[in-house]
Image (cartoon, rainbow, N blue to C red):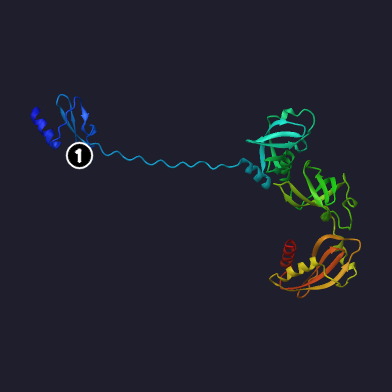
């Protein structure tokens, strides 16, 4: 073993002449004023009794990663969800907080809305306090964005669910609930609460001045579904499409003559037909007038008999019937599709 003197000499030699003396065991690299040992250098531990221990220096402490910058969450106005639900027809869940004279005050999160009594499902009479605390499925039917108010309908949400069972082009029994200047509202017999509009143009093939001439409240009718929007609870119906078109049955009995003037709406259809790829020409043919049967909107019929170089069709508007000749290489089915597209694009 080495004597104390030899150990001291070796220690001083390792430290290049710098003496280290501490009363207790210490890390030379942590002495006040001493530089931290570089990686791979030797550190010296000295005790008060003169014991010396050599040890490799600690590796350089790894650098701490820079914490990611936390971005503040983007605030989303909850009222925007109500606006979106009104536009899309989406059903929302609301909770009844209280009742007043007009209906139920409800909440959707932190927002407050209102459901009138006549928009609640069932009887809106008697003690309705049992509704307080209940959750309702409802449709947003109106919004006041300035005051952040909105009105909902539980009936509309129920009607939307029932409408999923309805098929377009199918006929249903219905009762007329009200008559307006623009048409009649009816409610399905087998689906209470499901109501739709029969526009005045879809009421009858006959000429009439006012809606109540051809239909009355309380009358039971057969209506065909011609338009359906389940999300927004919109139902378009037709009564006249459930009946035979008298014009189609009597085209050959009318008194036809030369065309005097072509209505603007018919001229617009002619212009669209001329632009169809495959149609070479569209010309005006005969014209007739039906005094007793009028069409409320422009209707076009493709005649059954084909000509050698195309087809003839009859356009009807009001009491006027106009025959058009189409020179084309298209087949009858292709021509039918082109005419349908031209009518829808008006």
Image-quadrant location for residue 277 = bottom right
Where 284 sits versus 190, above or below?
Answer: below
The quarter of the rendered structure image containing the N terminus is top left
Q: Nearer the viewer, residue 83 or 135?
A: 83
**Left of 181 or right of it: where is 114?**
left
Image-quadrant location for residue 110 = top right
Q: Nearer the viewer, residue 91 or 302?
A: 91
- Residue 231 in the image, given as x and y percentages of width and height: 69, 46
- Residue 327 in the image, given as x and y percentages of width and height: 75, 74
Which residue: 63% across, 44% down? 80
- Residue 230 in the image, given as x and y percentages of width and height: 71, 47
Q: Nearer the viewer, residue 141 or 269?
A: 141
Give the total number of marks visible in the rendering. 1
**Left of 330 or right of it: where is 258?**
right
In the rendered image, the residue lying farthest to the front is 33
Residue topped by disc 1:
41
Q: Nearer the viewer, residue 322 or 78?
A: 78
Where 324 sits versus 126, above or below?
Answer: below
Which residue: 81% across, 51% down? 198
Badge 1: few (under 14), some or many (20 or more) residues near its Cα, within 10 Å? few
- Residue 182 in the image, given as x and y percentages of width and height: 83, 52
Q: Is residue 78 visible?
A: yes
């Amino acid at each position: 073993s080495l004597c104390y003197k030899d150990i001291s000499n070796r220690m001083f030699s390792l430290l290049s002449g710098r003496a280290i003396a501490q009363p207790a065991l210490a890390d030379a690299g942590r002495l006040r004023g001493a530089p931290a040992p570089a990686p791979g250098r030797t550190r010296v531990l000295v005790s008060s009794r003169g014991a010396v221990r050599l040890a490799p220096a600690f590796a350089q402490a790894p650098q701490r990663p820079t914490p990611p910058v936390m971005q503040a969450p983007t605030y989303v106005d909850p009222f925007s969800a109500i606006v979106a639900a009104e536009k899309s027809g989406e059903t929302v869940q609301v909770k009844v907080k209280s009742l007043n004279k007009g209906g139920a005050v409800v909440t959707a999160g932190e927002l407050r809305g209102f459901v009138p009594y006549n928009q609640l499902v069932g009887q809106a009479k008697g003690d309705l306090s049992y509704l307080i605390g209940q959750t309702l499925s409802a449709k947003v039917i109106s919004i006041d964005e300035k005051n952040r108010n909105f009105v909902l309908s539980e009936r509309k949400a129920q009607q939307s669910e029932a409408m999923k069972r309805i098929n377009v082009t199918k006929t249903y029994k219905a009762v007329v609930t009200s008559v307006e200047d623009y048409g009649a509202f009816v409610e399905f017999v087998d689906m209470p609460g499901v109501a739709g509009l029969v526009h005045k143009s879809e009421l009858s093939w006959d000429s009439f001045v006012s809606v109540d001439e051809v239909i009355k409240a309380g009358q039971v009718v057969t209506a065909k579904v011609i338009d359906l929007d389940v999300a927004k609870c919109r139902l378009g119906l037709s009564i006249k499409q459930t009946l035979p078109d008298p014009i189609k049955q009597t085209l050959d009995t009318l008194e036809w003559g030369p065309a005097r003037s072509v209505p603007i709406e018919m001229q617009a259809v002619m212009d669209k037909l001329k632009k169809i790829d495959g149609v070479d020409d569209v010309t005006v043919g005969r014209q007739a007038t039906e005094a007793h049967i009028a069409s409320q909107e422009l209707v076009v019929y493709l005649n059954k008999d084909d000509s050698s170089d195309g087809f003839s069709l009859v356009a009807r508007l009001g009491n006027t019937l106009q025959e058009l000749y189409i020179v084309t290489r298209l087949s009858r089915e292709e021509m039918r599709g082109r005419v349908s597209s031209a009518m829808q694009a008006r």
